[in-house]
Amino acid sequence: MTPEKNFYTVRGYQLLNTGNKVLTSSMEDYLEMIYRTCMEEDYIRVNQLSAKLNVRPSSTTKIVQKLDAMGLINYQRYGIIKLTKSGSEVGAYLLNRHLILEKFFQMIGDQDVSLRDTEMIEHDISASGLRYIQLLTDFMEYHPEVKEKYEQFKKDYRLPNHE
């Protein structure tokens, strides 16, 4: 007899995961974009951030204030946004997670939807799941003959169209 498993809806898993997270998915997106920008410049302004994320400046201000209260950024009203040391560490993790998933989706599937798929999954994947995806991606890069076999298999295999 197999042990009983608990199954949840996607929202159920998200709710289970919130106990381990301090940042919301939206806050993660903002912090990741702040980090991306601050890698090139030392700061970003609210209007720049809102434009990059395609949201209203008023929404951006609310999230930025929360990130500031959490000690992840330094923000002055109508001023600039700079990362704290802690914010930089979290931002680096968020960007790395994003890049791992995006690379995975580009490697296994359709280049055109890899960004969308990454954005849909990145906030809810476990650290363990992310490590295995990175391991598989690294394995396929290290063994190009396996990647070639996969590409040939993809060509020969008829995927059901679920979109």
Image (cartoon, grey):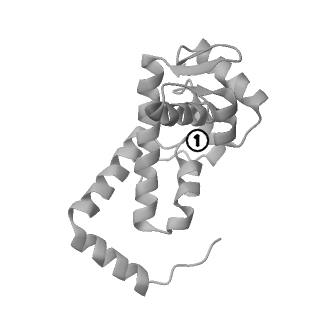
Which residue is found at the position 66% from the left and 17% from the top?
79
Name the outermost residue toward the bottom. Answer: 156
Q: What is the crowding at mark 1: few (fewer than 14 residues within 10 Å), some, or many (at least 20)?
A: few
Please tell me whether residue 73 is drawn above or below residue 24 in the rendered image. Answer: above
x, y percent for residue 20: 51, 27
Foreground residue, 53 or 139?
A: 53
Please tell me whether residue 121 is drawn above or below residue 19 in the rendered image. Answer: below
Q: Which image quarter is the C terminus in?
A: bottom right
Q: Which image quarter is the N terminus in?
A: bottom left
Foreground residue, 44 or 9?
A: 44
Visible residue check, residue 3: no
Q: Amino acid at mark 1?
A: Tyr
Foreground residue, 141 or 12?
A: 141
x, y percent for residue 134: 34, 50
- Residue 139: name its quadrant: bottom left
- Residue 30: name its quadrant: top right
x, y percent for residue 128: 38, 42
Residue 95 left/right relative to 63: left
Residue 10 left/right relative to 151: right
Q: Secondary structure at mark 1?
A: helix
Residue 134 left/right relative to 80: left
Residue 83 left/right relative to 129: right
- Residue 52: name its quadrant: top right
Which residue is found at the position 41% from the left and 79% from the top?
154
Which residue is found at the position 42% from the left and 33% from the top?
92
x, y percent for residue 62: 72, 23
In this figure, which residue is indicated by the disc labeled 1? Answer: 13
How many marks can you see?
Answer: 1
Visible residue check, residue 149: yes
Please tell me whether residue 110 is drawn above or below residue 45 in the rendered image. Answer: below
